[in-house]
Image (spheres, rainbow, N blue to C red):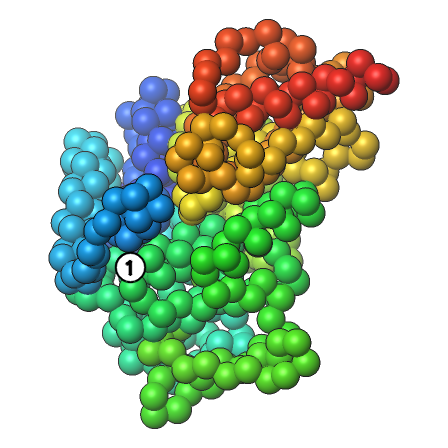
Amino acid sequence: MSPSPSYTEVDVAILGGGTAGMAAYRAAAAHTDRILLIEGGAFGTTCARVGCMPSKLLIAAAEAAHTAEHAGRFGIQTTVAVDGRRVMERVRRERDRFVGFVLDSINSFPDVHRRRGYATFLDDHTLQVGEETIRARAIVIATGSRPKILPMYRSITPWLPEEQPDAAARRAAGVLVSDDIFDWEDLPASLAVFGPGVIGLELGQALFRLGVRVRVFGVGGFLGPLADPEVRADAIAAFSAELPIQTDARQLRVSRDHRGVVVRWIEDGAEQEEHFELMLAATGRTPNVDRLGLHHTSLTLDARGVPLYDRRTLQCGTSAIFLAGDANADVPLLHEAADEGKIAGDNAGSWPNVRRGARRSPMAVMFTDPQIAVIGAPRTALADPIVGRVSFVDQGRSRVMLQNSGRLHVYADRLTGRLLGAEMVGPRAEHLAHLLAWAHQSGMTIPEMLAMPFYHPVVEEGLRTALRDAAAQLGAG
């Protein structure tokens, strides 16, 4: 019997048209022309639509307002008025421009290589997309992730836990996720932010600087990706000096009344209560793998329902299924998603020949003020490293710019002197992070890094101070 018109056979099927999916498509296309890119939602990538780019547009506006408002510290008098509608109009306009670039890339792929619809597995090699059955020699899962709303916040929401409310329903309930912010037409009067991680702290500080009454709540004393207790303590002190933040709010409770969202917590032994127009649940993201019908496959799943995989090959077990980007819940960063998509697409295209792909040194940056960066291995992953320290409080260039807060710790191997990692909160961390990541990936030692040129006066001299501290300890050892 011949296949029906709704049956298609390909060499590679890619689920998801985001950063990882597009990278996988390009890599697989180098091996075969029998390829399908399947997307059920909107094309445009998380980064362009609701992540990196619109958040940085909001942060840029906040930085402009903050700089003007505090120009008096330099003897310059200014008057600042934030026009929330104009701020958000620019965010949306430029966001749409970035999304347009992504759509141009997607539209450059041949029509025959694209399918719209949500895919579910029938077995390790078979997918159902609407009325079409697709048989693939290899499959790449690159379905991304979505914001997560923890159960404690659902007590004030009108939907059931298994439902996925749209933006209008979330707004009506007063509980937002980060995806909602970039479609605002104006700024709210007040916002409670739950989660002092990358998303919560970046957006919370930006909105605070744009005139929104903001308070950030966390539990356990954590802040962003920082693991080093000294660096984290400096970071908490720096942010608390500007922004109302409780990194370890006790007995945190959330409810609603006629005025909006009510947050109650215990602080210094006394119950505190504050009302907000809206709340933002910035408590992480969930991989979009729960609706793929993975129970029909041979894959082994972890407690979150994510397939177990090899992060060097992106292969799930010994199957012809590969897992890339935010869907694997490993490192939800654009450059990592692009690298993973390339590795997964290359291996899917060359299946059954699977090779390990080259992975870059870990690097994470938070675009707060002061900025936060973690490079290589975090402090908690290292047994007994040399720790080179510097505070930016008295660092020359930092004081010149009135950005003299925070600290940098570099970690080195006691025997070889090789750089193992670094954690930092302070000025220009996005640039120092690149220097440190390049040195880490190159396998440089502390003496080799100190042999590199340092100009004066620059923030990088602070890095040199930390390296000298580490070198002195290596020499003593």
* Image quarter (top left, top right, bottom left or bottom right) of the N terminus: top left
* Residue found at x 21% / y 51%: 78
- Choose top left, top right, bottom left or bottom right for residue 160: bottom left
One can see residue 447 in this view? yes
Residue occupied by mark 1: 210
Q: Position of residue 165 (x, y in %)?
A: 34, 73
One can see residue 116 in this view? no
Query: Camera-side residue: 9 or 303?
Result: 303
Q: Position of residue 475 (x, y in %)?
A: 80, 14
Amino acid type at mark 1: Leu
Query: Camera-side residue: 241 or 63?
Result: 241
Q: Position of residue 110 (x, y in %)?
A: 18, 32
Q: Position of residue 236 (x, y in %)?
A: 57, 54
From the viewer's perspective, is 396 left or right of 466?
left
How many residues crowd mark 1 within 10 Å: few (<14), some (14–19), many (20+)? Answer: many
Q: Which element carries disc 1, helix, strand or loop?
A: loop
* Image quarter (top left, top right, bottom left or bottom right) of the C terminus: top right
From the viewer's perspective, is 420 left or right of 331?
right
* Residue found at x 54% / y 9%: 452
